[in-house]
């Protein structure tokens, strides 16, 4: 009887829906992002790394956070694997920072700035620094897409067979 009761409690806990945290709810509301991968940013606000500049390595839009290269380092423990001959060790790895704790760096002054969007005469949309009015271009790293991994096997169609007409009514 006691085990049945414990099992029912476990099942009830698993079936209850949990609300996402307020931070995650705010991240879901956001549709426009000013910061992209490859941008140079500076840490602002109340943060131990305040004043440090770095380049955005990754933007985690679902959690409203970014990873900045060389900023907010923390220890990451790597387990030993005796079968492969790998020793256990500790490495320093970048941790996430909340999106609101970083600002884009103004290319003309080198200081953090807020931005606004503007259309140029030719119709392109650009980011403009509020302090100096300088245009902040989107980085080329952001525009590069990761290649889609493709595996070619014997089951794949050859180029000659792709265009061959195989249907006969």
Image (cartoon, rainbow, N blue to C red):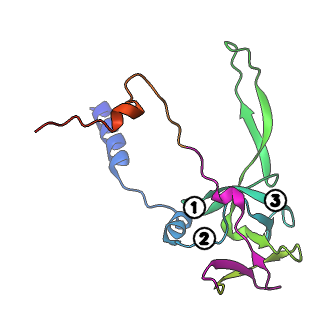
Q: Label 1, label 3: how many angstroms apart (C-alpha)?
A: 19 Å
Q: Label 2, label 1: how many angstroms apart (C-alpha)?
A: 8 Å
- What mark, if any, has residue 54 been given in the picture? 3
Q: Secondary structure at mark 2?
A: loop
**Quadrant assignment for the N terminus:** top left
Q: Which residue is mark 2?
A: 33
- What mark, if any, has residue 36 been given in the picture? none
Q: Is residue 119 in view from this perspective?
A: yes
Residue shown at the point (66%, 63%) measured from the top left: 36
Question: How many other residues sit within 10 Å of disc 1, few (<14), some (14-19) or many (≥20)?
Answer: some
Vertical arrangement, residue 65 with respect to residue 147, above or below? below
Q: Do the numbered discs 2 and 1 sit on residues whose CB atoms are within 8 Å? A: yes
Q: Label 2, label 3: how many angstroms apart (C-alpha)?
A: 18 Å
- Sequence-earlier tag: 2 or 1: 2
Q: Which stretch is magenta?
A: 122-147
Queried whether the magenta region covers residue 143, the answer comes back as: yes
Queried whether the magenta region covers residue 155, the answer comes back as: no
Residue shown at the point (71%, 22%) measured from the top left: 80
Residue shown at the point (57%, 61%) measured from the top left: 61
């Amino acid at each position: 009887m006691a085990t049945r009761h414990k099992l029912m409690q476990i099942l009830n806990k698993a079936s209850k829906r949990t609300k996402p945290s307020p931070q995650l709810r705010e991240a879901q509301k956001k549709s426009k992002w000013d910061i992209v991968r490859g941008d140079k940013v500076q840490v602002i606000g109340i943060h131990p790394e305040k004043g440090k500049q770095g380049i955005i390595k990754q933007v985690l839009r679902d959690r409203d956070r970014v990873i900045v290269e060389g900023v907010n380092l923390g220890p990451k423990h790597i387990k030993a694997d005796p079968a492969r001959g790998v020793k256990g060790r500790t490495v320093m790895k970048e941790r996430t920072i909340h999106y609101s704790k970083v600002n884009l760096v103004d290319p003309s002054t080198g200081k953090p700035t807020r931005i606004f969007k503007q259309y140029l005469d030719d119709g392109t949309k650009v980011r403009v620094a509020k302090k100096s009015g300088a245009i902040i271009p989107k980085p080329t790293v952001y525009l590069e897409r990761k290649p889609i991994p493709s595996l070619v096997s014997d089951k794949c169609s050859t180029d000659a067979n792709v265009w061959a007409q195989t249907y006969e009514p």
